[in-house]
Image (tube, rainbow, N blue to C red):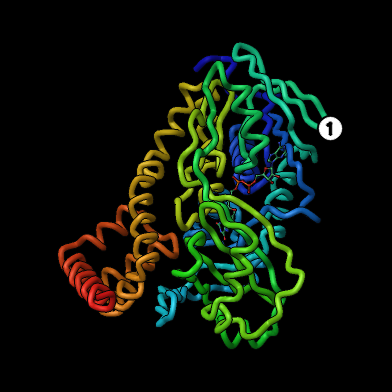
Amino acid sequence: MENDLIVKDGTKIAIIGGGPAGTSFAIKLLKESQKKGIRPKVIIFEGKDFNIHYNQCVGVLSPPIEEIFINSLEIPFPTELVKREISGYIIHPSGGPSLKISRGLGTYATRRILFDRFMLKEAKNLGAEIINSRVTAVEFFNEKEVRIYSEGKFLRVDAVVGGFGLDEATASVFEKASSNTFKYKRPEKALETIITKIHVPKEIIEGNLKSMIHAFLLKNIKKIEFGAITPKGDHIIINIAGKNVSSSDMDLFLNQPETKEILGEIEFKELDYFKGIYPIKPAKGVIGNRFVAIGDATGWIRPYKGKGINVAIETGTKAAEVVLNYGFSKKALMKYLDYFKPLKKDYIYGKIFRTLVIFSLRTGFIKEILKISKEDEKINESIYMAVSGEGKYKEVLEKIFSFNSFFKISKGFLNFYLKKFNRNK
Ligand SMILES: Cc1cc2nc3c(=O)[nH]c(=O)nc-3n(C[C@H](O)[C@H](O)[C@H](O)COP(=O)(O)OP(=O)(O)OC[C@H]3O[C@@H](n4cnc5c(N)ncnc54)[C@H](O)[C@@H]3O)c2cc1C
């Protein structure tokens, strides 16, 4: 190990971003270094005040979140944050009928702002210094140090951790700072999302939604790839996603007969809409001498159903483990890259799956697939895996393309196409 690129007493590590990835890195590094009797200095820069600012998110924690908390963070899962236990998914295609899929419990709806506060407090209690300030520029001196400019403080540190999510301005900061070295490049393509929170009468949550996440695959609104309604304690979260979705797509979504059937004739006045993005392509240059990106900044989340918080915790804790045990040279950090290779590899399968979904959505064939899945266990399982985020896209496609299931889908498609052809004659 290069002697100046390892964690020792007094080594300064700055984490840019106090979201789930950044805080997980801090928690893991501080806990493990305590066990080794080393005392590094961990500093988290967080631009938001989690008492008033939100990281846009539905706040659903998916399995195996409890194991991730215990195994990766060594913290019991904070059940006090759970607003509702989710028992499954109902998929609504245009014009119905819907498909209900559930496989036991272990999915939890939380309030993201409370989750972020919890994680930041855990990191602080372990000794991380929190600087409530936005980082505006970074300079890498590979032989010596990293210099960090922020709105409040200037720091010289030994290594920097990129836990800044998909923040465009911060991605630009790192792209510029690394242009002559490791060449960080943000996840190129992204799906845009719009999200809103609505307080609705209790009967709608308990009577219509019933602890299920309702996913909508609607044909009519071209720009929306999917939409969902998620029940929380006393409110619901509605989100839509697509290549270039805008607030008018959300207005349209809220007024579709399929959504109205669940929400009733509520008047949607003065709703606050928030915009976010999902990466659908991995970032480049995620490691370098004195640098490692974690969480969304890597773009490694599943391209359709993200499980972003799980990935943020897993990448954050794994990066901390590698940094502590092997150091923060680019060579040492290759161990971190190698560990997450399977996640990156699944991108191509995710892309194929997404193309298939968009095709079936636009042609209306999705209804046939949902119908077939009621009789075909493998297709049913693959839909569950895709919607819940459990299992890799490779496994989802393997199930769809297994001989029997593929035969049924092909037969269904032929019938669907012939019916359409006859109608158009
Ligand atoms: C609409 C939407 C809904 C989602 N729903 C879910 C869900 O239900 N479940 C799930 O698991 N995932 C969900 N995700 C994905 C999930 O939110 C992310 O994958 C996860 O938050 C990634 O964590 P992170 O720590 O990498 O980044 P983030 O959570 O984005 O945290 C990055 C932090 O860095 C800070 N930051 C950025 N730049 C700077 C700077 N220059 N200086 C200081 N601080 C900075 C930001 O303020 C932020 O707090 C959703 C995403 C979107 C867009």
Q: Residue at x 59, y 64 (%)?
A: 249
Q: Kindly give the residue lying farthest to the top in the view shown.
A: 143
Nearer the observer, 37 or 329: 329
Q: Position of residue 418 (x, y in %)?
A: 21, 74
Q: Kindly give the residue lying farthest to the front in the view shown.
A: 425
Q: Residue at x 61, y 57 (%)?
A: 246
Tell me the kind of residue under disc 1.
Gly
> Within 8 Å of ligand 1, the CB of disc 1?
no
Nearer the observer, 173 or 146: 173
Report whether 137 appears left or right of 65.
Answer: right
Residue 69: quadrant of the picture: bottom right
Q: Residue at x 71, y 43 (%)?
A: 126
Report whether 123 appears left or right of 86.
Answer: right
Residue 210: quadrant of the picture: bottom right
Q: Position of residue 321 (x, y in %)?
A: 53, 36
Image quadrant occupied by the C terminus: bottom left
Q: Is residue 316 visible?
A: no
Label 1: how many residues lie within 10 Å, few (<14), some (14-19) or many (20+)? few
Q: Which residue is mark 1?
A: 152
Q: Position of residue 385 (x, y in %)?
A: 38, 63
Placement of 101 over or under 331, stated as above or below: below
Q: Position of residue 340 (x, y in %)?
A: 42, 40
Placement of 213 over or under 319, stated as above or below: below
Report whether 378 appears left or right of 8.
Answer: left
Q: Residue at x 73, y 25 (%)?
A: 148
Nearer the observer, 111 or 362: 362
Residue 94: quadrant of the picture: bottom left
